[in-house]
C-alpha cells in the first residue's frame, strides 16, 4: 500500500540523498574495499563470505532497522523498564533499558551497539552508540550514533524515523523514515543453516 509519493527513505537532507563522505570516510571506504579484494572472491573462502552468508548477523537487525530481503518482521514488546525488539531474520534481540542509566565505557563495544531509551510524549526515542564497527551500516564506523524514534500512529501502524551520525564517515547527520505496519501471526524461528552446512556446501559448489 503506497501511502506517499516519496521516492527516497531519506527525509533529511530534503533532497532525499545521503550526504557526501568526508575525506576520512573516503579513505576508510577505499581501505575496506582493498581489504575485501585481498581476501579474494566472495566464494573463495569462509572469511571472504559476507556476514549474512556466514549467519553472523543480518542487514535488518540494525540499528537502524532496515528492510531485509525476506523475513523482514520485528516483534516489539514493552515491559516494566524495558523494550525488547526481536528481529525475525536470524536471531538478534535488542534489550533497551528505559531507566535513564548511562552508556557503558566506550571500551565496551558490540555488533549492534548498546541502546538506551526514553519516552518523549508518545514517542519512544532510542539512542545507540558503542558499535564495534564490524557490521557497518552503509560504510559506517565504530563512531556511529543512531537515534530512532517510534511513534504509534494507529493500532496497526508505527512511524519509524532514524537519524544517523558518524562524523568520521559523513559530512553531516542524515535522517530517514520507514512506515511499519502490523502483521498477523507469529514470528517463526529463522535458524539460518544448521551447523554451517550451507557455508560448506556453497564453497564446495563454487569449486565444482
Image (tube, rainbow, N blue to C red):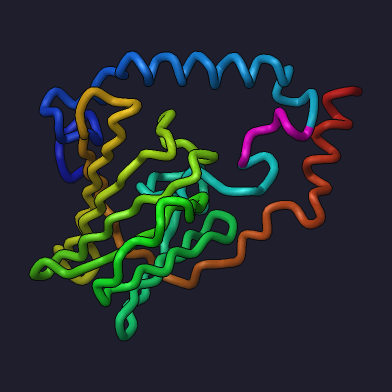
Residue 73 sits in which quadrant?
Answer: bottom left
- Asked whether 100 or 21 is in front, the reply is 100
Q: Position of residue 18 (x, y in %)?
A: 26, 25
Residue 162 is one of the magenta-drawn residues: no
86 w.r.t. 5: above or below: below
Residue 91 sits in which quadrant?
Answer: bottom right
Image point (35%, 47%), residue name: 64
- Asked whether 172 or 184 is in front, the reply is 172
Give left or right: position of 187 versus 98.
right
Give left or right: position of 63 versus 110.
left
Magenta highlight: main SS: loop
11 w.r.t. 68: above or below: above
Give left or right: position of 87 versus 116.
right
Image point (27%, 73%), residue name: 98
58 w.r.t. 50: above or below: below
Q: Position of residue 57 (x, y in %)?
A: 58, 48
Q: Can the viewer see residue 75 in this picture?
A: no
205 w.r.t. 153: above or below: above
* Furthest residue in direction bottom, as rendered: 80
- Asked whether 35 or 85 is in front, the reply is 35
**Residue range highlighted in magenta:** 46-51
Q: Can the viewer see residue 36 in this picture?
A: yes
Q: Position of residue 198 (x, y in %)?
A: 79, 44
Q: Looking at the rendering, in which quadrant would you find the C terminus? A: top right
Image point (39%, 61%), residue name: 104
Query: How many tags in the picture?
Result: 0
Q: Position of residue 5 (x, y in %)?
A: 15, 34
Image point (37%, 18%), residue name: 24
Amino acid at each position: 500500500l503506497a501511502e506517499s509519493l516519496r521516492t527516497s527513505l531519506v527525509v533529511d537532507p530534503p533532497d532525499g540523498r545521503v550526504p557526501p563522505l568526508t575525506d576520512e570516510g573516503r579513505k576508510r571506504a577505499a581501505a575496506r574495499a582493498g581489504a575485501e579484494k585481498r581476501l579474494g572472491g566472495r566464494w573463495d573462502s569462509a572469511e571472504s563470505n559476507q556476514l549474512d552468508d556466514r549467519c553472523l548477523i543480518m542487514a535488518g537487525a540494525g540499528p537502524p532497522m532496515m528492510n531485509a530481503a525476506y523475513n523482514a518482521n520485528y516483534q516489539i514488546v514493552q515491559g516494566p523498564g524495558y523494550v525488547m525488539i526481536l528481529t525475525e531474520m536470524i536471531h538478534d534481540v535488542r534489550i533497551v533499558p528505559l531507566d535513564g542509566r548511562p552508556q557503558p565505557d566506550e571500551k565496551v563495544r558490540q555488533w549492534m551497539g548498546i541502546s538506551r531509551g526514553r519516552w518523549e510524549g508518545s514517542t519512544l526515542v532510542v539512542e545507540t552508540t558503542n558499535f564495534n564497527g564490524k557490521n557497518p551500516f552503509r560504510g559506517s564506523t565504530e563512531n556511529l550514533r543512531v537515534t530512532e524514534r517510534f511513534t504509534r500512529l494507529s493500532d496497526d501502524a508505527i512511524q519509524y524515523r532514524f537519524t544517523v551520525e558518524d562524523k568520521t564517515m559523513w559530512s553531516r547527520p542524515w535522517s530517514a523514515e520507514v512506515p511499519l505496519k502490523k502483521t498477523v501471526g507469529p514470528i517463526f524461528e529463522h535458524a539460518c543453516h544448521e551447523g554451517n552446512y550451507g557455508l560448506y556446501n556453497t564453497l564446495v559448489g563454487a569449486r565444482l
